[in-house]
Amino acid sequence: APGELRAIVDELYDQLARNCRRFKLIDTSARDYPELAALWFEGARGDLLLRLRDYLESRISRVLLMPVPDVAAAARLVLETTVFWAVHRHFDSRPEMISEELARDTVAHFVVRALSKE
């Protein structure tokens, strides 16, 4: 499960980083456009959170990952941590001078270590 989780986090990070300007624009614009907010927060982002939650529940129930107090909150933590480092940090007024590769590896390391039974 740790290798599988690492692959999921890496893929999520890569998709977000590749499209960081698009995601930032959608995320920012969704506040002003209710239709876009519904598509984004309830649709695409909501679906991703559901899939992450289902994955974590599945692996935790099979004792492949550590149990967490709340699976939905853990899924949100994984997503938001990845989104911050892959997308939002690039728009920070005082961005961290960390390479994309190091940021990606650090996110995956923390997520995997936090949830891994090993």
Image: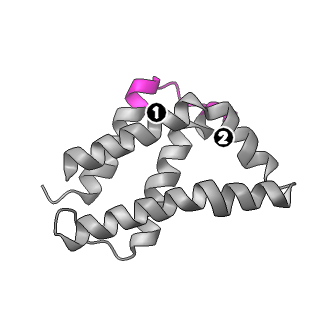
Q: Quadrant of residue 117?
A: bottom left
Left or right of 70 in this view: 95: right
Identified by mark 2, the residue type is Phe
Residue 14 bears which disc, if any? 1
Residue 100 coordinates in the image, percent (x, y): 46, 25
Q: Is residue 61 above or below residue 12?
A: below
Write the start and end of the magenta stretch as one range: 90-103
Residue 15 coordinates in the image, percent (x, y): 50, 35
Examine the structure image and report whether residue 39 is included in the region drawn in magenta: no
Give the Cα distance between marks 1 and 2.
Answer: 13 Å
SS class of the residue under badge 2?
helix
Residue 54 coordinates in the image, percent (x, y): 38, 66
SS class of the residue under badge 1?
helix
Residue 115 coordinates in the image, percent (x, y): 27, 59
Identify the residue at horizontal 40%, vertical 25% (top origin): 101
Examine the structure image and report whether residue 93 is included in the region drawn in magenta: yes
Q: Which class describes the residues within 10 Å of circle 2: few (<14), some (14-19), or many (20+)?
A: some
Are discs 1 and 2 less than 8 Å apart at CB? Answer: no
Residue 4 visible, this orientation: yes
Q: Quadrant of residue 8?
A: top left
Q: Is residue 106 above or below residue 32?
A: above
Instruction: Point out the residue furthest to the bottom here.
Output: 69
Instruction: Point out the residue furthest to the right here.
Output: 32
Residue 86 bears which disc, if any? none
Left or right of 71 in this view: 45: right
Identify the residue at horizontal 24%, vertical 47% (top origin): 4
Between discs 1 and 2, the one toward the N terminus:
1
Mark 2 lies on residue? 23
Instruction: Point out the residue furthest to the left here.
Output: 118
Near-viewer residue (8 or 70): 8
Identified by mark 1, the residue type is Asp
Identify the residue at horizontal 40%, vertical 38% (top origin): 11
